[in-house]
């Protein structure tokens, strides 16, 4: 893969994140919001990435990744998630402390080093937030996960991953003990605001907001 600047890598990862979440092209404004920058700066960078054949870009239309762009983005995602595993498993950071550190470490791109890091960690398939780790070939494990918000009353599921990685959100999950691996049953789903009341395997009940339910992935 061609050598890219840190900024170019950040743009590719942002586009990958947005298009994966929205299942459509990423708008200039969405990219600007994701990277906390100006729309004009985004437009300039998109031209550069298009010239390098990493994205499909037409003015006033959504941005999508080319196959080369997708593989490059997945390589960055792989490095980020492997570093998050390292920080938690080997350096004993909390899952709410690792995102920003991994954002810096992910730009170490020597494939030999990254593959040895993966081997050292036992070739993990998911990071501490439950997100799948792409293989060296850019393949993602299938997981059949759905958002907690999609469950109906009476359904049971296991918490598998979180979509939101902010420190405040992860600390909230720790506080209410809504962590990965927890078994829950939906007891009530309010039509007014789509908030939910769930019960844990130990019988404890918890009321959670629609926003929280839309930020957690579960497996039925």
Image (tube, rainbow, N blue to C red):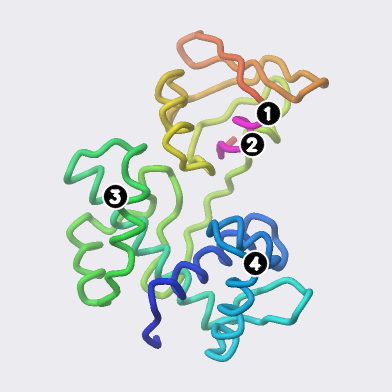
Does label 1 or label 3 sit earlier along the sequence?
Answer: 3
Residue appearing at x 45%, y 50% in the figure: 131
Q: Which label is found at residue 210?
A: 1
Reading the image, the residue beneath label 4 is: 39
Q: Is residue 213 magenta?
A: yes
Q: Which label is found at residue 214?
A: 2
- Measured as percent of width and height from the top left, residue 151 is found at 69, 31
Q: Secondary structure at mark 2?
A: loop
Please report contact status of discs 3 and 2: CB closer than 8 Å, yes or no.
Answer: no
**Label 2, label 1: how far apart the Cα atoms are:** 6 Å
**Label 4, label 2: how far apart the Cα atoms are:** 27 Å
Reading the image, the residue beneath label 3 is: 85
**Label 3, label 2: how far apart the Cα atoms are:** 24 Å
Residue appearing at x 65%, y 20% in the figure: 186
* In this view, 194 is above or below 129: above
* In this view, 66 is above or below 194: below
Residue appearing at x 60%, y 71% in the figure: 42
**Label 1, label 3: how far apart the Cα atoms are:** 29 Å
Please report contact status of discs 2 and 1: CB closer than 8 Å, yes or no.
Answer: yes
């Amino acid at each position: 893969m061609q050598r890219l600047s840190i900024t170019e890598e950040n743009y590719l990862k942002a586009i990958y994140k947005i298009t994966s979440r929205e299942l459509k092209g990423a708008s200039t404004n969405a990219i600007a919001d994701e990277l906390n920058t100006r729309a004009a700066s985004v437009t300039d960078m998109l031209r550069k990435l298009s010239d390098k054949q990493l994205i499909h870009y037409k003015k006033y239309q959504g941005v999508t990744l080319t196959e080369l762009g997708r593989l490059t983005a997945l390589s960055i995602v792989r490095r980020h998630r492997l570093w998050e595993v390292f920080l938690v498993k080997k350096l004993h950071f909390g899952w709410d402390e690792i995102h920003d550190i991994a954002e810096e470490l992910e730009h170490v791109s020597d494939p030999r080093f990254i593959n040895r890091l993966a081997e050292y960690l036992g070739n993990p398939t998911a990071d501490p937030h439950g997100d799948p780790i792409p293989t060296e070939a850019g393949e993602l494990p299938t997981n059949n996960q759905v958002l907690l918000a999609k469950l109906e009353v009476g359904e049971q599921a296991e918490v598998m991953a979180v979509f939101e990685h902010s420190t405040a959100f992860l600390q909230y999950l720790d506080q209410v003990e809504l962590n990965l691996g927890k078994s829950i049953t939906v007891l009530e789903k309010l039509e007014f605001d789509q908030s939910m009341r769930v019960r844990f395997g130990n019988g404890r009940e918890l009321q959670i907001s629609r926003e929280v339910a839309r930020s957690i992935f579960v497996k039925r």
